[in-house]
Image: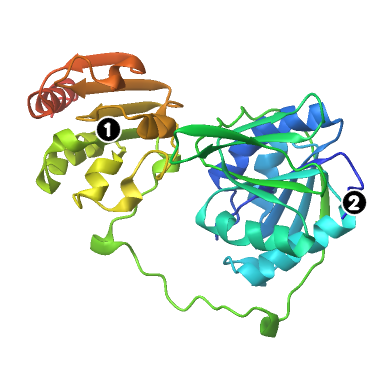
Amino acid sequence: MEAKTKDLWVFIETNEDGTAKNVGQELLTPGRDLATKQGGKLVAVVIGCNVDPAIETVGALGADQVIVVDGEEYKRFTTDAYTTALCTLVEKYGPTSMLIGATPNGRDFGPRVSSRLGTGLTADCTGLDIDEETGNVAWTRPAFGGNLMAKILCPDHRPQIGTVRPGVFKKGKPGENKAEVIREDIHVAPEDIRTKLLQVIKEEGGESVNLEEADVIVAGGRGVGGPEGFATIKELADLLGGEVGASRAAVDAGWIAHAHQVGQTGKTVGPKLYIACGISGAIQHLAGMTGSDVIVAINKDPDASIFSVADYGIVGDLFEVVPLLIADIKAARGE
């Protein structure tokens, strides 16, 4: 289809309580820059149920316009309902490009949207820019197992669509911006929604993992030595109010669930504090955590690659260092 505007859209994924998930808020940051370079508006697209909290949030984060689809059928994500709503909006307004978070939901319906619209989609992007020669969005994503970074252009079809990993960009600071709010009345008949959510099953052990939104992550690698070694990692993470992360080596060894994996084939994170324990620093792991504000590395090998990106490095056995950190934190708190 042909673009009707030069606008850039950011899809805002919502929670069941109508608030905006972090990834959509993060994407408004590069979205502002791309929209300016394209010469169009930054438009936040909010789909969900009772989403006034999300509208207020994205408006304060700099969106020029917020297009809203609100209805009971959108309370919980379904591919059919969300695809229908988003495609209806795209066909009406004709944006030039669109960013979608590479969450489980975004990875599900992003390709469905691009297929229905007859355009391309660049998946799992870690970098965004405008190509100076063509004016197209330059989507950067890992290739060949993370050993190369590919720049992809979509010159012929619109809108240009890409899914972007959570944690790659930082949320902006809320301001006094007042976005124009446009509400669209789009409903999907129950018989046209072919999947139904019957039950929510928690992760084994009842543990939930939310690495993308964590302010503190304590991660373990091959140096943890086995599944029992993560008990020490978890104790420090709990003490700091954080989450437990892991390298691919630890996950592949079966020491911890894949939901904890940080890196090229895991989660991309950007916490305020990232503590890497017994992690050598393979490029695939670094690609997922170098956006952290402060990185602390603990490793017995003084030549480990992780020290090249760390703000603070401790050369030593994690099973000696981490208990000392735990003891000092408890002492400082009077525990």
Q: Are marks 1 and 2 in contact (CB under 8 Å)?
A: no
Q: Position of residue 106 (x, y in %)?
A: 58, 55
In the picture of the structure, the residue carrying the numbered disc 2 is: 2
Which residue is pictured at 74% across the width and 35% down the height?
137
Assign a secondary structure to mark 1: loop
Which residue is pictured at 64% across the width and 30% down the height?
174
Quadrant of the rendered image containing residue 134? top right
Tell me if residue 308 can be seen.
yes
Query: Is 48 placed left or right of 269 in the picture?
Result: right
Front residue of 251 and 275: 251
Outermost residue on the bottom side: it is 191
Q: CA distance from mark 1 to mark 2?
A: 51 Å
Q: Which mark is residue 211?
A: none
In the picture of the structure, the residue carrying the numbered disc 1 is: 240
Quadrant of the rendered image containing residue 234? top left
Q: Quadrant of the N terminus?
A: bottom right
Q: Position of residue 290 (x, y in %)?
A: 42, 26
